[in-house]
Amino acid sequence: MSIPLTDVFLLWHTHNLNDDFGTHEETKLIGVFSSEKKASEAIEQLKCKEGFRDFPVSCFEISRMKIDQTNWADGFFVARWTE
């Protein structure tokens, strides 16, 4: 009998990006994993790859999320850059 999956672990990579519009955060969702261990293993595989190796390992973040649960319910706004 298998145990129902109720939690997943999201692996993110976030760093500051400088471009023509200034400095802003660049965030990538790397993957969704069934355990924190598997997400950590993915960090070990990626930390020396092109792009990722240019930033500290602290740019990786593992977030635990419940399945079938709204985790962002407050709405949002859009920021637009102008020259």
Image: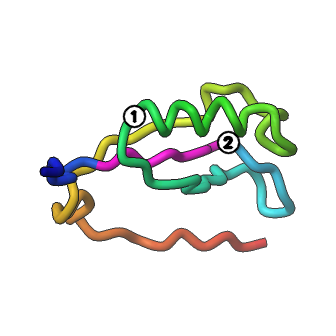
Q: Residue at x 66, y 29 (%)?
A: 44
Seen from the viewer's position, the closer of residues 80 and 64 is: 64
**Dot 1 surroundings within 10 Å: few (below 14), some, or many (20 or more)?**
some
* Residue 27 image point, x, y percent: 60, 53
* Residue 40 image point, x, y percent: 52, 31
Seen from the viewer's position, the closer of residues 19 and 10 is: 10
Task: Describe the element under mark 2 as helix, strand or loop.
Answer: strand
Q: Residue at x 73, y 49 (%)?
A: 23
Q: Residue at x 84, y 57 (%)?
A: 19
Q: Which mark is first along the chain, 1 or 2?
A: 2
Q: Amino acid at mark 1?
A: Glu
* Residue 67 image point, x, y percent: 22, 59
* 12 magenta-colored: yes
* 63 magenta-colored: no
- Side of 49 relative to 26 (left or right): right
Q: What residue is pinned by disc 2?
A: 15
- Side of 60 relative to 6 (left or right): right
Q: Nearer the viewer, mark 2 or mark 1?
A: 1
Seen from the viewer's position, the closer of residues 75 and 55 is: 55
Magenta residues?
A: 8-15
- Side of 25 relative to 69 (left or right): right
Vertical side of 33 occupied by 43: above or below: above
Vertical side of 29 occupied by 78: above or below: below
Res. 79 image quadrant: bottom right
Task: Describe the element under mark 1 as helix, strand or loop.
Answer: helix
Q: Residues at badges 2 and 1 in contact (C-beta under 8 Å)? A: no
Q: Residue at x 54, y 46 (%)?
A: 12
Q: Amino acid at mark 2?
A: His
Residue 36 numbered mark, or none: 1
* Residue 71 image point, x, y percent: 23, 57
